[in-house]
């Protein structure tokens, strides 16, 4: 966390009346004290979560013993790109996910660090297959292996832009042959088809775990997040099996009404 | 300044207001979000919890909304967006949909009156979404308040109705397609005109400048701009429910357990504190994605 004073802070001018200077410094002191107290609060929360995670990992908390992992049909993990360089941590996380029985996984970081290390990551997993290979061989429903999809920011808005051009070209073709010029009118299903046509066949994740400093999806494909539950797991360096089990357990108890 | 409901403030309210001002003077030592978005979740659960009659939760929710908007605008947040009605909500029971539409109509008409929060804070109100799906009376009232507040410039209230993100993205593709097809038509007309002329330079330049829909085209044609810095969804739910999926790339998602009618100043303040804690990180991420 890097605190920066904002535009709301008053400018200090040595020629201004001393009372204004004193009140500025006093307010700055109060602001920094407030943030210090908040940081101490978060430190305490992290320690409690670490202890809880340890207790869950060691099986002392019975509630998280049996997980209904079938409810997690597609799991996505977003990792902060700077933290994604800790490949050994990422591999450990994926091994936990694999051992828990997750069948389909999407790994995302905005800069594509995980994509660059795809080969290393896949070789470290016991029984996993790249998502594209599973789609080609039509074995997505095969429960024997975990499929792993790698994504970055170019697979989000930029992919949607490419799909938009597919629809646009179809519209232009139709407009050329049509009697009059109609306004373009597309549907969400057509957008789905266009994305699949350019190779984006990954489904919407049920659960998205965010490893990083902030609870923010960092550009994961907007088309695939409609009803995805998003859980912030904290920085990758503090990851633990217990927190992962707790997040998945909590997801299995969520009930969605999809707007109805 | 009188409160948004037009009543003379009591001593207690005045004291509360000055304490808030004191708190804001501390918070504004750091960056303040330009835009906060809200998902108003939990009105029906609130009504059930407090055994209120049907619609009681939504009425309590509306009062909470006015309070939250007051806090935001007092703090200096320029844009606030609320998710008032989703396209998916049309699948609710008809009488429930009708109740929400009637409540919206009643509140829009109330907002146009004197002494409302709109005038108190010089708010420009904009309804965004697939407004063709709205019933005629609500659409007319929405158009009326948008025209009446078009010149207000201090703050902006975006009300997402008949909105889903996926519908918004498709709409952006349609708008971008129309704009680009005009460009293609112009190129073709130019091509035809040049076929009879002597110069081919202009034709080549124009054909090369056309490269299809770009990301910036889609971003210009979304309903909601600028993008929010913080999104608050009440009731502890951790999903976006097809809301602002495009705009939340660098947005802090905050899910307090309070039901929407229970939301208060402490939630707004907490979200601002967290925004300030992670401001540098998110600014760096925004720069990377540009």
Image (cartoon, rainbow, N blue to C red):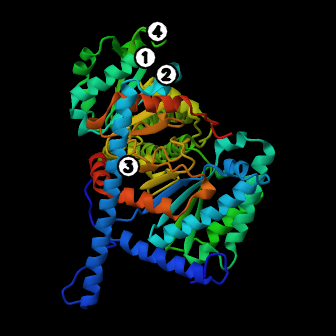
Residues at marks 4 and 3, common chain? no
**Residue A193 pos. (x, y %):** 52, 26
Residues at marks 2 and 3, common chain? no
Residues at marks 1 and 4, common chain? yes
Residues at marks 4 and 2, common chain? yes
Extreme residue toward the front, this view: A60
Q: Earlier in the sequence, mark 4 or mark 2?
A: 2
Residue A50 sits in quarter: top left
User: Mark 3 and mark 2 in contact (Cβ < 8 Å)?
Assistant: no
**Residue B277 pos. (x, y %):** 32, 56
The alpha-carbon separation of the residues under discs 1 and 2 comes to: 10 Å
User: Mark 1 and mark 3 in contact (Cβ < 8 Å)?
Assistant: no
Residues at marks 3 and 1, common chain? no
Question: Mark 1 highlights which residue?
Answer: A101
- Looking at the image, can residue A206 be seen? no
User: Mark 2 and mark 4 in contact (Cβ < 8 Å)?
Assistant: no
User: Mark 3 and mark 4 in contact (Cβ < 8 Å)?
Assistant: no
Question: Mark 2 highlights which residue?
Answer: A67
Tell me the element at label 3.
loop
Mark 1, residues whose alpha carbon is within 10 Å: few (<14), some, or many (≥20)? some
Residue B143 sits in quarter: bottom right
Tell me the element at label 2.
loop
Tell me the element at label 4.
loop
Q: Residue at x 69, y 39 (%)?
A: A260
Mark 3 — on which chain does it sit?
B
Question: Mark 4 highlights which residue?
Answer: A142
User: Mark 2 and mark 1 in contact (Cβ < 8 Å)?
Assistant: yes
| Observer-nearest of A131 and B48 | B48
């Amino acid at each position: 966390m890097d605190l920066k004073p904002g535009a709301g802070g008053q400018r200090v001018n040595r020629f201004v009346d001393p009372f204004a200077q004193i009140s500025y410094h006093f307010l700055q002191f109060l602001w920094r004290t407030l943030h210090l107290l908040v940081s101490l609060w978060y430190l305490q929360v992290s320690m409690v979560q670490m202890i809880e995670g340890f207790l869950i990992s060691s099986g002392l908390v019975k509630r998280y013993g049996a997980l209904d992992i079938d409810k997690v049909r597609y799991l996505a993990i977003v990792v902060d790109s700077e933290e994604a360089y800790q490949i050994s941590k990422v591999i450990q996380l994926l091994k936990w996910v694999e051992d828990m029985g997750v069948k389909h996984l999407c790994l995302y970081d905005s800069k594509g660090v995980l994509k660059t290390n795809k080969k290393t990551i896949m070789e470290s997993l016991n029984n996993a297959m790249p998502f594209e290979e599973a789609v080609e061989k039509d074995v997505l429903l095969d429960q024997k292996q975990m499929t792993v999809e790698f994504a970055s920011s170019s697979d989000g808005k930029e992919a949607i832009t490419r799909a938009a051009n597919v629809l646009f070209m179809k519209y232009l073709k139709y407009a050329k042959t049509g009697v009059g010029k109609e306004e373009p009118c597309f549907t969400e299903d057509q957008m789905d088809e266009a994305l699949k046509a350019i190779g984006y066949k990954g489904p919407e994740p049920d659960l998205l775990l965010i490893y990083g400093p902030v609870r923010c999806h960092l550009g994961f494909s907007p088309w695939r997040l409609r009803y995805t539950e998003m859980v912030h797991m904290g920085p990758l360096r503090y990851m633990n099996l217990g927190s992962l089990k707790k997040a998945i357990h909590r997801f299995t108890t969520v009930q969605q009404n999809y707007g109805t | 300044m009188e409160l948004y409901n037009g009543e003379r403030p009591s001593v207690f309210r005045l004291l509360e207001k000055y304490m808030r001002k004191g708190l804001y003077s501390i918070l504004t030592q750091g960056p303040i979000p330009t835009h906060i978005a809200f998902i108003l979740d939990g009105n029906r659960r609130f009504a059930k919890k407090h055994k209120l009659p049907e619609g009681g939760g939504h009425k309590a929710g509306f009062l909470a909304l006015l309070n939250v908007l007051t806090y935001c605008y007092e703090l200096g947040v320029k844009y606030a967006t609320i998710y008032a009605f989703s396209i998916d909500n049309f699948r609710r029971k008809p009488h429930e949909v009708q109740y929400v539409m009637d409540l919206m109509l009643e509140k829009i008409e109330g907002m146009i009156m004197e002494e409302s929060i709109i005038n108190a804070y010089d708010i420009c109100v904009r309804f965004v979404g697939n407004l063709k799906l709205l019933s005629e009376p609500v659409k007319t009232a929405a158009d009326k308040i948008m025209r009446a507040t078009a010149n207000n410039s201090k703050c902006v209230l975006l009300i997402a109705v008949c909105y889903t993100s996926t519908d918004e993205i498709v709409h952006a593709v349609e708008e971008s397609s129309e704009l680009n097809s005009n460009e293609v038509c112009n190129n073709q007309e130019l091509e035809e005109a040049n076929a009879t002329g002597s110069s081919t330079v202009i034709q080549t330049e124009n054909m090369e400048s056309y490269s299809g829909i770009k990301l910036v085209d889609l971003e210009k044609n979304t309903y909601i701009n600028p993008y929010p810095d913080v999104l608050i969804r009440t009731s502890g739910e951790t999903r976006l429910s097809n809301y602002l999926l495009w705009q939340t790339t660098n947005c802090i998602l905050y899910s307090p357990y309070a039901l929407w009618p229970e939301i208060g100043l402490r939630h707004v303040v907490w979200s601002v504190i967290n925004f300030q804690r992670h401001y540098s990180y998110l600014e760096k991420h925004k720069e990377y994605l540009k």
